[in-house]
Each structure stands twice: as C-alpha cells, then as structure tokens.
Image: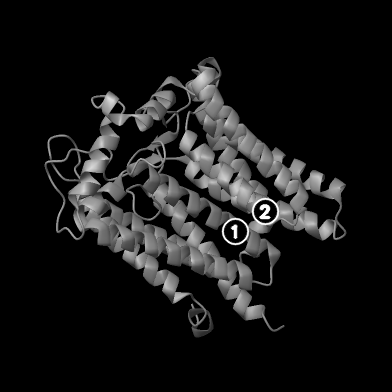
C-alpha cells in the first residue's frame, strides 16, 4: 500500500472501528455464557481473531478498484442465492450437507473447524451491490426520465430483491428480512425515481403497517398466516413481558434489568443477571449493565459518527455507483442499530438481529467489515479522481 493511498484513508472511521473492537471484546468478556453464571471469555478471544481476519479482508477490498464489484455483481448475487436456496431445500427435507437448524431457523451452515456461516449476512451485502449496479446502469441508459422509466426501474429492483427476501423470510428470519427491506427502501429513495412515486410507495408501506396493526387486534387469523408461532409469541411478549416472564418475555425482562443495573456509570456486569444470547443479540444490554448510561450513550454516538462518515463519502463521491452502495450500507447499519438497541429496551419487538461490530459472530462481523472496506475504497477513488 503506497503513501498516496494511505493519505486518503478515513482514519476517523478506522478509529471508530477500533473503539468498537475494544468495546466488543470487553462486553463479550463480561457477558454471561449461560444460566450458570460463567462468562463468555473464550468467545471474546475468538472475537479478536474474527476482527483480525475481517480487518485483513476489509483492507484488501479497500485498496481494490470497487468498480470491479459492478462487473461481478451477478456472480456474488448468484452465490448468495445458491447458499440461501440450499437452506430452503434442507428446510423442505432434502439432505443438504452442512446445514444447521439448531437455533430454531434454517439460517446457517456448520463449517468444520470454522463454525457457523450465515449466508443472509453476506446476501444483504450482495443485494446492495446488485441494486447499486442496476440503478446505475438504468440511470445511464435512461437519462431522460418519466413515469414509465421509473416504473421499469422499480420492476428491476423488485425482481432482484424479492427472491432473497422471500427465502430469508421463510427460514424464518424476520429480523434479517426487515434489514433487506430497509436496504431496498433506502436505495429507492436515492435512485432518482420521482418523489410522487416514492410518496405512493411510502403510502403503501404505511398502509401495510396499519393493516398489520388492525389485523393484530381484530383479525388474528391473518397474523397466523403471516407470522410463525414463535414470531407471534415475541410480539406478545413485547407487549407484556411480565405476563410471559418465564417464557418469551424472559429475555426482555432480563435485558431491562441488566441495563437498569448499570445506572449512570457502572463498573462491571452484574453476574446475578442471567441473560440468554447476551454475547450476541443482547450485547447492548451487557454494555448498559457494564458501563451504565454513559457507556450506552457513547456506543450510540459512535454509531452516529460512523454513519455520518459513510454519508459524507456517499455525498462527496463523483461516481453514482459508489454513492448508491454507501447509501445501502447506511440503510443497513441504521436499521440494525435501531432494531437491536430498540429490542433491548422494549421499543421494538425482539428479533434475532446482531448489533454491527459489537455482537459476537464471524458472519456478522465479516460482512460489516467488508462494508467498511467498500466505503473506504469509494473514498480513496473519489479523492483520486475528483479533479480530473
């Protein structure tokens, strides 16, 4: 890596990721591993290994010409769909090797000597690249836009988005499905489509949410057709966790107890609190319990700074393709942060969704770090060609 490239790296973003790595290690170290009170110390050290590996991959992507992603996006998309389709076939009863359904969903492959691989974590990245390439190509082809061209673009985006969305939804993985949805919406907003059409789409989305709420209270049989039983139970526990304190509401109650125990500025996790998946989906509860209100707010501010740096790269770049990718990454991170933190404090229903850069997990961390590598690559190329 030459000095010219080194001088163009966003070191503020790198420092934020370094802080996330430190917070992740400490939080996982203090997180309870199981109900016996033992800590997830071994997972904390494994997280360091994943960070080192992910950093190396992100660095390679950073120095690569990201325009190659545009030329190869169908290969990535096809690979992701192949892996997701394999999980679907296993769910239907076919003997697909390495599939792991131990967590109540058909979302993982178990790789010997490595651990679990979650294809949907990488598919959301492949989806961003394919959507960005499609929008960029369409806008180059149709520089004079009308309603017909906008509808054509929406049709293209729907054809790309619906297959992975459906395959992930039926795993079932509602949380990841919503991440896909947030990516799609964020990229449609910046795609150049008429705001009248975007307003109509948003109106349909709001109408769908209103219909869901009305159906929840008035027509529960419709909800039974949409949600699996365990997903419906999560909504019920979200509404009244103490009514289901020994079942679906247990995690939420323990999460609230953990965050509350941190007070304003605490020094150490309360070992008396048993919180399932504390080192993974509920890592923010550990952060709140270990570092208190100050620590929790610091994490939120770090996410705000990270997102602002990505937005700045998206605005500054001369290349629409790079800008579209950055926008999709912003939409992905924003929703995951809002949903994950929201579910730990009862603002959002509980879904199996990780907190980017902080939750334990190789697939989640690697996909997030690849996103950072792409953003850095866009920034480097933007500065290199800005005045040419």
- Image quarter for residue 368? bottom left
Residue 385's spot in the image, x, y percent? 67, 79
Check whether the beta carbons of the residues at disc 2 and disc 1 lie within 8 A of each other: yes
**Viewer-side residue, 24 vs 369:** 24
Q: Residue at x 14, y 47 (%)?
A: 270
Residue 344 lies, in percent from the top left, at 33, 43
Real-space Cα separation, disc 2 to disc 1, in angstroms: 9 Å
Of the two numbered discs 2 and 1 on the same chain, state the one appearing first in sequence.
2
- Residue neighbourhood size for the residue with mark 2, other residues' Cα within 10 Å, grouped as few (<14), some (14–19), many (≥20): some
Looking at the rendered structure, the secondary structure element under dot 2 is helix
Which residue position holds label 2? 189
211 left or right of 237 in image: right
| Image mark for residue 288 | none
* Residue 258 in the figure: left or right of residue 331: left
Do we see residue 300 in this rendering? yes
Write down the residue under mark 1: 327
- Seen at 53% across and 19% down, the residue is 218
Vertically, is 213 above or below 42? Answer: above
Q: Which residue is painted at 85% across and 48% down in the image?
A: 147
Q: Is residue 112 left or right of residue 30?
A: right
Q: Position of residue 384 (x, y in %)?
A: 62, 80
Q: Nearer the viewer, mark 2 or mark 1?
A: 2
């Amino acid at each position: 890596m030459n000095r010219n490239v080194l001088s163009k790296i966003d070191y503020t973003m790198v420092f934020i990721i370094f802080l996330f790595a430190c917070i992740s290690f400490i939080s996982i170290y203090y997180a309870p591993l199981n109900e016996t009170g033992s800590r997830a110390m071994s997972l904390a050290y494994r997280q360091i290994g994943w960070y080192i590996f992910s950093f190396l991959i992100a660095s390679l992507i950073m120095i690569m010409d990201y325009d190659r992603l545009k030329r190869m996006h169908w290969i990535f998309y096809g690979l992701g769909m192949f892996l997701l389709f394999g999980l679907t076939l296993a769910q239907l009863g076919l003997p697909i090797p390495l599939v792991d359904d131990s967590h109540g969903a058909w979302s993982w492959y178990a790789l010997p000597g490595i651990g679990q691989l979650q294809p949907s974590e990488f598919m959301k990245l492949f989806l961003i690249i394919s959507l960005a390439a499609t929008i960029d190509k369409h806008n180059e082809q149709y520089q004079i836009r009308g309603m017909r061209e906008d509808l054509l673009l929406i049709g293209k985006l729907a054809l790309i988005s619906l297959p992975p969305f459906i395959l992930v939804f039926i795993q079932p993985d509602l949380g990841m499905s919503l991440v896909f949805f947030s990516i799609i919406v964020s990229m449609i907003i910046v795609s150049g489509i008429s705001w009248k059409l975007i307003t109509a789409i948003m109106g349909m989305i709001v109408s769908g949410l209103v219909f869901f709420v009305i159906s929840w209270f008035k027509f529960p049989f419709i909800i039974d057709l949409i949600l699996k039983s365990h997903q419906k139970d999560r909504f019920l526990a979200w509404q009244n966790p103490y009514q289901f304190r020994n079942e679906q509401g247990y995690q939420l109650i323990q999460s609230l107890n953990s965050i509350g125990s941190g007070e304003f500025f605490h020094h150490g996790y309360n070992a008396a609190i048993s919180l399932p998946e504390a080192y993974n989906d509920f890592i923010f509860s550990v952060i709140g319990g270990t570092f208190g209100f100050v620590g929790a707010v610091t994490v939120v501010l770090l996410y705000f700074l990270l997102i602002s740096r990505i937005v700045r790269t998206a605005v500054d770049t001369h290349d629409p393709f790079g800008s579209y990718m950055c926008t999709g990454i912003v939409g992905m991170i924003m929703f995951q942060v809002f949903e994950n933190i929201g579910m730990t404090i009862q603002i959002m229903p509980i879904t199996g969704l990780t907190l980017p850069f902080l939750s334990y997990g190789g697939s989640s961390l690697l996909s997030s770090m690849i996103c950072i590598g792409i953003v850095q690559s866009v920034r480097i190329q933007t500065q290199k060609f800005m005045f040419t």
